[in-house]
Image: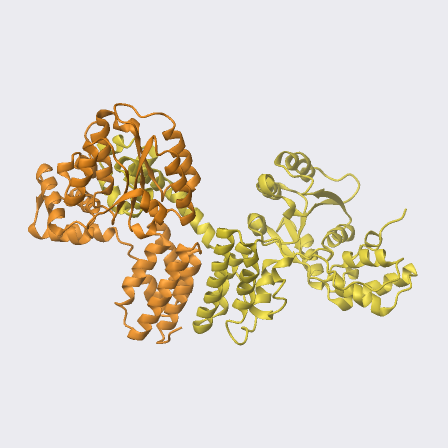
Amino acid sequence: MHKNLAEKYRIRIYPEFVGQDKAVIDIKTFIKEFPKKKGAILYGPAGTGKTSLALAAAKENNLEVLELNASDLRNRAKLEEVLKPATQQQSLFKKGKILLMDEVDGVTGTDIGGIPELIKILEETKHPIIMTCNDVWQTKLSSLRSKCKLIEMKALPVPYIEEILRKIVEKEKIKRDAVFLNQIAIKSQGDIRAALNDLQSYQLVDSAVDLSEKRDVEDSIFNILKKIFKERQDFLNIFDTTKMSLDEILLWIEENIPKEYGNEALAKAYYALGNADVFRGRIYKNQSWRFLVYQNIFQSAGISYAKKFPLAGFTKYDPPKRILKIWLNNQKMQHKKTIAKKYAKFVHCSVKRAMRDFSMIKLILKRYAIQKQLQLGDEEINFLSNGGG
Amino acid sequence: MGQSDIWTERYRPTKFEEMVGQHEIVKRVSSLVKAMNIPHFLFSGPAGIGKSTLALIIVKELFGEAWRENYLELNASDERGIDVVRQKVKDFARTKALENVPFKVIFLDEADALTKEAQQALRRTMENYTNTCRFILSCNYSSAIIDPIQSRCVVFRFKLLEKKDISEVVRRIAEKENLKLSPDSFETIYEASEGDCRRAINLLQATSSVALDINSEIVNMIAASNKPTGIKVVLDYALAGDFINARDKLLDVMLKESVSGVDVIKEIQKEIWNLHIEPEIKVRLTEKTGEAEFRMTEGSDEFVQLQALLASFVLAGQGKAT
């Protein structure tokens, strides 16, 4: 059978994982210490060998692999049906089992109900569960994160990829010079699978590699922040490599500016962010997407050059807290809003005013007769008797 | 409808002669109403000086008992966009007026909350239904209303109520509700109301829920609870160089007390002059504050702009201007 190179040369044993020593050690400990942690998440950019490492772990320990793909099992019912019995049965031939759940970040939208289910299964399973994903820091995975051992797979440096390519070229008897391999390696941006696919596709064509055509690598938000705050590079297309919206990135930057800047630089950075936001407002107001380029630049270079030299060393970036706080507050204050609405209609004023004067109004609304007149519900009355916010 | 226990409603004037202040306007409006034919009106002036009340008196005089069926009240700052306003107007204007008047009345409160574009759309709507409806628009500043609308309306500029007017209203209510007010509490209520009669009455009723013997101390206590309190603390944090606490506190204040970004800006602008910093820095900070407020009205994100402003305060705390 004619296999593609990426599949044919999939790594199967631990020693072959070049440049991933830490990850190999981590997964060994995970298997050894099981069930201390019942699940492990292998995360990192595409083509760094996450699935391969999981498969290798099974092979090295003589375990049977039950492979599942989250993208295929996009709902609670199926997760329950397939994963659950498997966790509690013993394997027939091998010593034990590993459950491999590829691409957990593929669980989206309405299927998110699958995540709590997965967590429940994690708690009950008798076999180690290994999951893979690109971006482990997404909010939807936060509950999963805390239950699992996190193992990072790094994008492979160019020389490593070159070396792998060189060996394969030799075995496959493909005639290619070192420059060509080097070009493919650079273009792959650390994605070994991409490099092998490229090698295969160029195998028969005698042309130079088009370096301008970079692979679409999903940059994590942490990389983007690092580029802005530390590395100062690729400003013009810095946001092209992520699926995160510009507005969401703005929130991340907003949250983390104080970690990198103080005093004058702090003021300058927020001044730039303010400008980015002004252009964001203009885009929305007039649908002038032309202004996007200005938002882009203020939000990247503008922030970056708020001071002469970037702060050296590692900074731990936090996800934006603002949206969560607003949400929590809305949950807590939903009765305030409905009461204000009823009151406003009754006394011919705007809801906004009623909200603003609420601390005064809530005293007036203490009287039962008034509560009845406004037809307040039990929960609303409760809310008022408990202090009204 | 029975009498309301909310005093702003119970004691709301229902006849022209009961209106407090605004004598000239009342005189002119009442003569128009007596002729049973009114033009479109634009009432401008600050909150709580009788704009909604006069509109209500107009419809009650025009339609008598049937005023509810012939009157639509909308608040532009609460409606989601001009399309909602237009749809509601359309639904309401479709049916003919009852009784012996040939039109219905639509009261659009806080019309200056509409953008210029939305006002253009409103102008078309006003024209389309001018045979069946009369509009009464209210706003804080008539300058915020586009000229084409102003020219279609008779514009009345309401005056701020004087201290004696507000005190008279308070005295009358206190008498009917059997409250004892110390002489100085009138002054305090007026000060806290900032000339807003609705707020004065609310303050009186809120205070009466705590004590029947009312003095200025209790009034002050209740009034203070209604002011966004945290802003000073926010600025203190910023001036001390603690940006992170300043912004966390700011978000808390805005969320817990339902204060908008513009309201925060107003507080900051007032507070700047009480700070212990060099006057020229105060001027620079005021400029920054004004810019932030302008940006918000232009559709910028309130919290981003406020953070940028706070960062300027951090510098000001070190004696530096940006």
* Res. B10 visible in picture: yes
In depth, the one of B104 and A363 nearer the eye is B104
Q: Position of residue A63 (x, y in %)?
A: 76, 47
Residue A108: image x %, image y %?
61, 43
x 39%, y 67%: residue? B242
> Closest to the observer: A27 or A240?
A240
Percent x, y of residue A257: 49, 65
Figure quadrant of residue A236: bottom right
**Residue B142 position (above or below residue A303):** above
The chain drawn in orange is B
Residue A388 visible, this angle = no
The location of residue A33, given as percent across then percent down, is 65, 53
- Which residue is drawn at the image coordinates 62% and 58% (left, top)? A220
The quarter of the rendered structure image containing the N terminus of chain B is top left
Chain shown yellow: that is: A
Can you say whether B233 is above or below A100 in the image? below
